[in-house]
Amino acid sequence: MDQYDGSVTLVVLESNRCQMSETMDVDTALTVIALISDDPDDWEQATSVWPRYRTPVVPEFTSSFPIEEIDRYEVSKLLSASEAWVVVDFPSKRIFTGGRFMAVGRDAAFAMFVDDDGVQHDPMSVHLPPWWELHEGAAVDSPDQPRQSAIEKPNVNRQILYGEPLLKDIATGVLEIVSSDSWRSSESSENNENNDAKHSRYLFTVTVHRDWLMTPRKDLDGRMPRQSLHGATGWSERVTWGQKLRIQNDGPAIAVPDDWPSFATAPMGHEEVCIYFDLCRELIDAAWRWCESEAGRVAQQNEDGALSELVEYLRVAKEAWLDSSFEGGSPPSFIIECDRRRVPRGAGVAIAGIEEVQAEQHVIDCDCPICEMMSAGIFGIGFTHIDGHHLELDEEFAFSLAETYEDWMIKQQEFAEFSDRVELLQAEREAGETTENPFASAWTGICDDGHLPGDSHGHLKLAFMIAEIISALEAAAASREEIGTLNESFNNYRLCDDAERPQSASALKANLQAIAQGYPNLVSKSADLQSRIDEAERNRWLRNNDFN
């Protein structure tokens, strides 16, 4: 079907009113559908996220929409007279499109403007929540029919998951274990840091954590806490990805409002689930520490008193951890807020609606030239994301990011097959049956002299090579001065102006030559890198003198 460019009829159904616009353009109607990605409960909430999806091709403010209230019983007749139409049914969480309106789909990304050179601009994404129905090419009487399935939207009781029930359950579980024969007969009871004691205690940690997640609770209507974590992580992550795309294309970072009535119980996203795992482990570890402390040993003489004191200790530990730095970056509380409000965390990027900004996580003195370049912003905004791989390390369904046991078993099988392929390839390499190396060096991957995308000066290729040389120096126990001098000479080379270029290039090559003299195994790489620097300088000279 050819793209329809005429007027679109938009109908908005709410519990207490019905509104319609007969003269909406296609781009604006498409943007209205995109608003549903944030799961608004009514038209007012939907229009409040307009700035998150608006592009220059649509009105700046929704107040300019030509929309008015109509009689609900007139909808079918009005749609019959429309060439293209969209109906948004908030009470039943459904979207209908019909007539000549374009196919949109549940998950799609659109470039809202294409310039004369064919370059796409102004990205906008549609990622409908799983509990919203989408009916495309619908009949005009479809909105009058009942919903096809029940609305199965996860309802998260965070007062239970983060509050007193969590603290009390962990405290109870830990106190029961430390008073058990299995604890006393294990090395966990010994207050030491040897590997056997750590391993023994870790098994108890897994038990407490698993019991909390997998035990049905009356205050959750018989559901397990784990069930509250899943059901929407994929959708939430896709919405956040769409916002990241907008920010990368110079759009603003705008958070979903936190004053919607449904916000408190809204589903968890991917990163909140990951942080929740870490919080539980932190609380369990804190409980072990308290039991070993003088105050803990004294309190355990009184069973009831021990429980209340440990719960209070965990409450303080929880608040302290949530507000502390997470892996050298922003605190968990900020990560959770961004995930719940579906906005990506870009280093130093201001977010409308949230006071805090994401901290820079790349460590300047980590000896990696690539990290140095990233921290300088040479590759654009540095976004931070938690992949959640650590939730799978225990090989326990309880902690996995998989929603169902069946999904988890499929992932386990896929991982086992992948591991078998890697082991087979490694065995073939060791037997000399193949030269393919999945862990090949940076030199192996550089097959031509062209630049990497976005690396017009060729610095990124050089950075990968220097990073490999630095890794070899660290393995050879080189001094910090040798490594630091190499990093400094490379930084001076890539950051200097044209007048300083010859001198900086000579200094970098001299440094590489000195390394080759001190470390014979690096002679060939040092020589090759020096020749690549010479070639880069020749190409630069040709460009500057219009010989290319």
Image: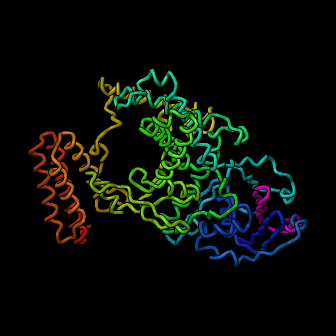
Relative placement, left or right, of 327 versus 77 is left
Quadrant into which the C terminus falls = bottom left
**Quadrant assignment, res 8:** bottom right
Relative placement, left or right, of 363 versus 150 is left
Residue ID at (31%, 39%): 440
Residue ID at (25%, 51%): 367
x and y percent of residue 3 in the render? 68, 64
- Camera-side residue of 174 and 353: 174
**Quadrant assignment, res 192:** top left
Q: Is residue 411 visible?
A: no
Q: Does 60 appear above or below 414?
A: below
x and y percent of residue 280 in the render? 52, 42
x and y percent of residue 317 in the render? 48, 48
Q: Is residue 403 visible?
A: yes
**Quadrant assignment, res 137:** bottom right
Outermost right residue = 73
Outermost bottom residue = 64
Q: Is residue 350 magenta?
A: no
Q: Does 377 appear above or below 134?
A: below
- Per the rendered image, the range of residues in magenta is 76-98
Q: Does 175 appear above or below 48?
A: above
Q: Does 175 appear above or below 493?
A: above
Relative placement, left or right, of 182 versus 428 is right
Coloring basis for residues? rainbow
Quadrant into which the N terminus falls = bottom right
The number of discs equals 0
Residue ID at (65%, 40%): 227
Relative placement, left or right, of 498 versus 181 is left
Residue ID at (67%, 62%): 260
- Camera-side residue of 243 and 40: 40
